[in-house]
Amino acid sequence: MHPTLTPVVALSNGTIFSSKGSVKLGFNIDAMSWSHNGKYVTFLTGPNVVVMDQALTSVVTKFSLQGGGRNKLGIGWLGSDCVVVWNSNGDITLIGPYGDECKWKIGLSAAGEGAAAKARSIKEFRLEVDGARWVDEEGGLWFIGRVPEVIEDIYNPGSVSTAACALLQQPVGDAVTTMLQIKMKEMIEKGVKGNELVHRVLEMVKGYEGGKGWRSEGIRGKIAVWLKSRGLEEEGKAVAKMEPELMFLIPVLLEMGMYKLAAQRAGSDTELLGMCLWEVERKLGREEFCNEVKTWGREGVGLVKKYWREQGKERDLIGFLISLGQVVKAADVVVAGMGEGNGDGDGGREEKIKEALKILNTQKGNDFQKATLTDELELISWRKQMQQQFVGIDFGHSVVSLVEGLIMYSSLDPREGAVANKAMNDTAKKFKVSDTRLVKIKAWGFARTKQWGAFMNLQQNCPKYLLDSDLFVRCAIACDAPKVEVGRYIQGVKDGYKRFKLWVEIGEMEQARKEASGNRSWLEEIGG
């Protein structure tokens, strides 16, 4: 009986009664038995064995008995997944969960080796927890036992139980790999290959992961390497791409020679990308490594450049850019001095410019970049001379800052004004500074340093074609020159309205009214 149906009365016509009602089956009942876990019930009906679920609503399996007669038939369960059927003639049949059968007759040899076996009838048959035992007609006691589940776990093909792995002296992952390799070898020998092989292998892995609650730990990668060793490189690559764990995927891709994909997958992890690039370069050497990266396309090349730039690996990036033929960019990196080896002051920059020029000279053209760097080298050299001659002044790193530094020096020591002025003119001549630009630099420099004498001298001695009266007025106003000085420069402005506005700007309203005399609209601007 089963607790959900007790008490139960089964009639031979297939009707079952219980306290919850009755069920009419579509067959007669010769015998019935519940499984030990209560999930299934089996019926003996004529020459057939029928297994149903506990609700008696669906047939799980149906099995047809062959021969053996029906003399006092009995039926029962060995465990929860094996049905045993017997009769008094000594016929015993075991039926497994997938319809497999095992049967034999009970008997012993009557006349020694080679003689026909003598069947013995069964007088008593008892089911027990781990098997069944019976007594034959001659008083012999027999026992058939279930194989313990722990033994099944060890010896079932493909088992990854703890006991099986311990017996094999392998971790779970290695045990699975071994089992899969055996199955893959069988498939390959049968001619399975290409996409079909890949599909079957991945399905087997999913089966282990889903059915046995086991985590793969890089199993796809191991399979990929194994397939490659068997000459199935394309199949191996297809399996490798399906490895979900980056820490397992990257080494496998490198082993398979899939360098571009390895770098792309590792791109989001700086440490993994660094390891990946280092390993590829170690395997191929610097020259072949650069050639390999060239084949990765714009995205791949950009990934490598971005990594080296962010890591401050100047030497690696420069060498890579040169290998790509991008010498101008390589020279720019050198001059920028980012990362390692960045010297201080002119000395470090001078060395970098010289190195950049060497790089540019490896390729024809790039004349503009070469000329620019050559000029900067000359400027650094000239700056050193100025620093030695005019001690204590920070001249900066441009031509303008050199001239302004000399102006500052002349303000500190007026006695050296003539010498400083000569140095300004020499600087302008050497670096091709136009006269107009030089006048503007000097005007603003003298005004900022309050050298009004030199400022006036510059205006008076400035050639007329270079003279910009507005420039001197603006410099004087911006640098707070005395109004007398400013007024002198305003008088030199040719445009009357500009003079009027300048007088207003410095607050000389009387002078502004004089300038606006006879012009009503100007006077209205200042209230008459």
Image: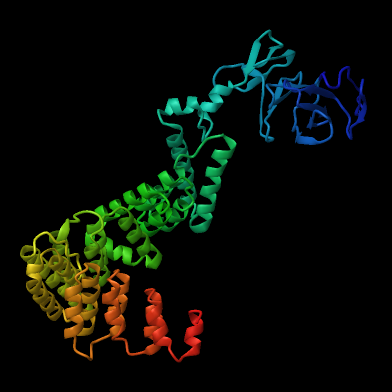
The residue at the point 50 percent across, 32 percent down is: 160
- Residue at image position (17%, 66%) is 408
Q: Is the N terminus in the top left, top right, bottom left or bottom right quadrant?
A: top right
Quadrant of the image occupied by residue 93: top right
Q: Viewer-proximal residue, 470 or 292?
A: 470
Residue in the picture at 10% in, 78% down: 426
Relative to 275, residue 437 above or below: below
Does 184 sit left or right of 206 as displayed?
left
Residue 225 in picture, x, y percent from top left: 39, 49
Q: Is residue 121 left or right of residue 283?
A: right
Residue 328, percent from left and from top: 25, 72
Q: Residue at x 31, y 63 (%)?
A: 292
Q: Nearer the viewer, residue 335 or 84?
A: 335
Q: Nearer the viewer, residue 86 or 313?
A: 313
Q: What is the number of callouts on the image?
A: 0
When asked about the image quadrant of residue 237, the answer is bottom left
